[in-house]
Amino acid sequence: MSLVIAGSIVFDTIETPCERRERIIGGSCSYSALAASYFTKPRIVSVVGDDFPEEMIEKFNEKGIDTRGLVRKKGKTFHWEGKYGDDPNQRTTIKTEVNVLREFKPHLLPDYREADIVLLGTIAPEIQLDVLSQVKEPKLTAMDTINFYIENSYGSLLESIKKVDIYFGNDEEVKKITGETNLIKAGKKFLEQGPSLVVIKKGEHGVMMIGQEFISGMPAYPCEDVVDPTGAGDSFAGGFLGYLDKVNSFQEKDLRKAAVYGSVMASFTIQDFGIKRLESLTASEIDRRFEEITKIVSF
Ligand code: AMP
């Protein structure tokens, strides 16, 4: 099986009530690919500027991430700045500098076009649609987005949603896109558009999956020490699809397990700034948290 992940690779400036970090590496593609790399060898599609450190690309390669689809262009790498209040679920975007991502026209390599699973991470919906149109016969497609595109590219975003099998969104985004205040109603509205599964991330309260045939809820891994919530959603999606790519099966039981692995990967991400924690995990740390969540949900 093979997993292609398209998304942003960026510099993030992040301010939490305790600390401020300038221009650390982030982006939907970085988080998702690192999370997925513990299960499979993801292939990435993205763009960075000539200010992006080569060592980071080498680090991606060391983690088994295929970076042949990562383009380096003359100019500045995308830069995002966000600020968190005391409630880690409340985030304010201070700045979005799109830079080289603005003109990005991805050309997928022949082997990327054969991908079994495609994750369209947070990136302009026009780019998501372009990537999707180049993959020949994917078995499973999924997407995520962020407020910026709900506000600036709503029409194209709806086109992307129509074309994927799984929509990953947080509760606020899902309500905003559908205009519903009830999550079940919002989830069902998505199912009418095209996706067969909606995965709604609710921060510390876990996730809810709404499919054509089932509804399921999973708790988040109980973390007391949330350092930086950035990238939790992207790590969730990477862990979820990385696991499905590994097991090569999309039955309901696999989707439920994938949601637990997604939660586990997100729980590591939020325990340090940026991608730091995701860079150095071990399989046994991941398995231990998987078992702990399993115990929490058994009755
Ligand atoms: P998450 O916390 O999972 O919503 O993902 C946050 C990541 O998305 C950060 O690393 C941001 O740099 C990245 N991001 C923020 N805004 C955008 C945008 N407009 N396009 C692409 N990536 C973005």
Image (cartoon, grey):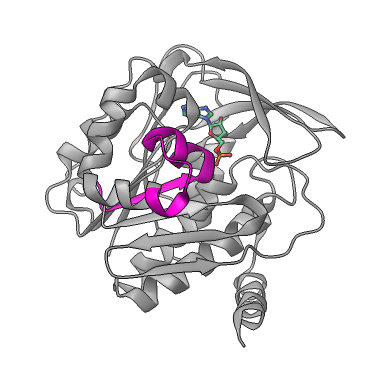
Q: Which residues are magenta?
A: 164-185
Query: Against 101, is 64 above or below?
Result: below
Foreground residue among 75 and 291:
291
Q: Quadrant of the C terminus?
A: bottom right
Q: Tell me the residue at 48%/48% (across/down).
A: 32
- Location of residue 40 by image quarter: bottom left
Question: Visible in this render: residue 63?
Answer: no
In the rendered image, residue 58, in percent from the top left (x then y), is placed at: 53, 42
Foreground residue among 253 and 270:
253
* In the image, residue 33 lies in the stretch drawn in magenta: no
Give the side of residue 266 with respect to residue 117, left or right.
right
Question: Visible in this render: residue 208?
Answer: yes
Query: Against 259, is 233 above or below?
Result: above
The outermost residue toward the right is 18
Q: Tell me the residue at 38%/60% (across/down).
A: 210
In the rendered image, residue 125, in percent from the top left (x then y), is placed at: 31, 29
In the rendered image, residue 10, in percent from the top left (x then y), is placed at: 54, 28
Q: Quadrant of the N terminus?
A: bottom left
Query: Against 294, is 134 above or below?
Result: above
The outermost residue toward the left is 136
Query: Against 211, is 137 above or below?
Result: above
In the rendered image, residue 64, in percent from the top left (x then y), is placed at: 46, 56
Marks counted in the figure total 0
* In the image, residue 176 lies in the stretch drawn in magenta: yes
Give the side of residue 112 with respect to residue 18, left or right.
left
The outermost residue toward the bottom is 299
Foreground residue among 51 and 143:
143
